Image (cartoon, rainbow, N blue to C red):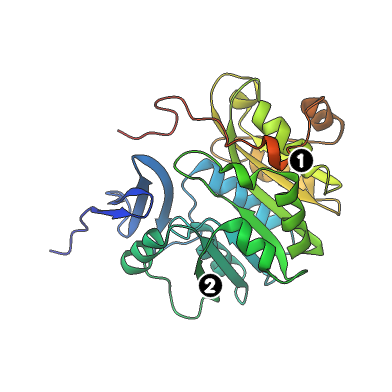
C-alpha cells in the first residue's frame, strides 16, 4: 500500500499541512494555520485548482505568445504551483521564487519535489528586499502572491514597492498580483491607485459576486507599461468554470475613484478575511 498520508509541520510562521486529494493520485493541498495556500498536482502541473491561480495562469498565458520562454520572478512560493505551471507551459523559462518562510520551502521541496531541469531557483528571503537588490530589467513577469498568514504585508503595498517591482521588469514586462478584499474595497482601490503611479496600463480580474460586494474574495491585478491583450484575457476568464470579470480603462478608473496611492508612512496590511472566507472543513 502506497496510500498518501497527510503531513503536518511547524514552519517559521505557523503550522503547515499537506493533505492528499483523494480524487487525484498525486495532488496535494497546502494549508498554513488552516488557511488554504496552494494546490498542486505533481502529475499534471497545468491543473490549477484555485480560482485565483487559474486567473493568474490565464494572465501568464496571454502576456506573450504561447510557449515562449520567460524570465519570471515569483514573490511568494507556496507549493510552487505557478512556477511548475510556467515550466510546463513555457519550457526553457528561467524562474526565481522568493519565499520568506524557509521552513515552508524546505517542506515543499522535501514532500513535493520539483522535476529536474525546471529552471526554477528557490530563495529564502523577504520579497521587497529581494526586489530592491535584484538586477534592473531582469524579468519579463513579476508575480506577487505574498501573504503573511491571510494578509498581504504592509511593506508590499506602497508606491516604493511598486517602483521596486517596475525597476526589475523589462520595458515590456508585466506585474501580476493576487490580493483579497471586500466592499467598499478601500485596500483594492488603494493598490490600483498605487500601481497607477508607476504603470500606464492596469487590469483587474475578479469574480462578479466579489465586485458586487456580496463576499470577500480574491482579485488579480495586472500592470504594465504596454497595452495588454484584454480581449484574450476576458475570453479565458469568462469561459472558466467560475467566470470572472475583466475591468480596465474607463470602468476601472471609475472603480478606483479618488483612492490615494499608499506611502510608506500610511501602509497597512490587507484586511483580515472574515471567518470562513478561505477556510476548509
| Residue that carries the numbered disc 2 in the rendered image | 120
Image x and y of residue 126, in percent? 55, 58
Q: Nearer the viewer, residue 108 or 11?
A: 11
Could you tell me which quadrant the C terminus lies in?
A: top left
Residue designated by label 1: 194
Identify the secondary structure beneath mark 1: helix
Q: Position of residue 230 (x, y in %)?
A: 78, 45
Q: Quadrant of the N terminus?
A: bottom left
| Residue located farthest toward the bottom when viewing the structure as drawn | 117
Q: Which mark is residue 36?
A: none
Question: Mark 1, mark 2: which one is toward the viewer?
Answer: 1
The image quarter containing residue 247 is top right
**Residue 192, horizontal then vertical, whole percent:** 74, 37
Q: Nearer the viewer, residue 74 or 203?
A: 74
Separation (CA) of disc 1 from disc 2: 30 Å
Residue that extends furthest to the front in the rendered view of this protein: 265
Q: Is residue 63 above or below residue 186?
A: below
| Circles 1 and 2: CB atoms closer than 8 Å | no
Dot placed on the residue nearer the N-terminal end, 1 or 2? 2
Q: Residue at x 54, y 49 (%)?
A: 146
> In the rendered view, does 223 fall on the left or right side of 149?
right
Residue 225 figure quarter: bottom right
Place of residue 145 in the rendered image (x, y in percent of width and height, measured from the top left):
56, 50
Residue pictured at 37% horizontal, 70% vertical:
113
Q: Residue at x 51, y 59 (%)?
A: 46
Amino acid at each position: 500500500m502506497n496510500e498518501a498520508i497527510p503531513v503536518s509541520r511547524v514552519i517559521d510562521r505557523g503550522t503547515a499541512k499537506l493533505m492528499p486529494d483523494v480524487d487525484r493520485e498525486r495532488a496535494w493541498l497546502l494549508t498554513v494555520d488552516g488557511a488554504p495556500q496552494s494546490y498542486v498536482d505533481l502529475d499534471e502541473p497545468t491543473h490549477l485548482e484555485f480560482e485565483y491561480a487559474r486567473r493568474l495562469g490565464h494572465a501568464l498565458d496571454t502576456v506573450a505568445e504561447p510557449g515562449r520562454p520567460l524570465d519570471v520572478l515569483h514573490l511568494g512560493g507556496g507549493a510552487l504551483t505557478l512556477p511548475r505551471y510556467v515550466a510546463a507551459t513555457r519550457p526553457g523559462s528561467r524562474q526565481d521564487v522568493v519565499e520568506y518562510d524557509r521552513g515552508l520551502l524546505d517542506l515543499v521541496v522535501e514532500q513535493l519535489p520539483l522535476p529536474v531541469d525546471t529552471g526554477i531557483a528557490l530563495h529564502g528571503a523577504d520579497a521587497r528586499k529581494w526586489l530592491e537588490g535584484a538586477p534592473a530589467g531582469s524579468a519579463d513577469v513579476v508575480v506577487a502572491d505574498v501573504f503573511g498568514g491571510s494578509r498581504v504585508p504592509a511593506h508590499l503595498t506602497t508606491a516604493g514597492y511598486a517602483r521596486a517591482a517596475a525597476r526589475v521588469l523589462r520595458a515590456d514586462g508585466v506585474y501580476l498580483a493576487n490580493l483579497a478584499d471586500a466592499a467598499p474595497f478601500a485596500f483594492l482601490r488603494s493598490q490600483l491607485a498605487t500601481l497607477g503611479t508607476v504603470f500606464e496600463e492596469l487590469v483587474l480580474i475578479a469574480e462578479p459576486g466579489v465586485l458586487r460586494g456580496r463576499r470577500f474574495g480574491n482579485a488579480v491585478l495586472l500592470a504594465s507599461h504596454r497595452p495588454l491583450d484584454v480581449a484574450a484575457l476576458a475570453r479565458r476568464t469568462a469561459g472558466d468554470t467560475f467566470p470572472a470579470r475583466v475591468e480596465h480603462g474607463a470602468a476601472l478608473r471609475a472603480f478606483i475613484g479618488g483612492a490615494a496611492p499608499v506611502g510608506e508612512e500610511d501602509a497597512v496590511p490587507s484586511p483580515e478575511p472574515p471567518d470562513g472566507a478561505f477556510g476548509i472543513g
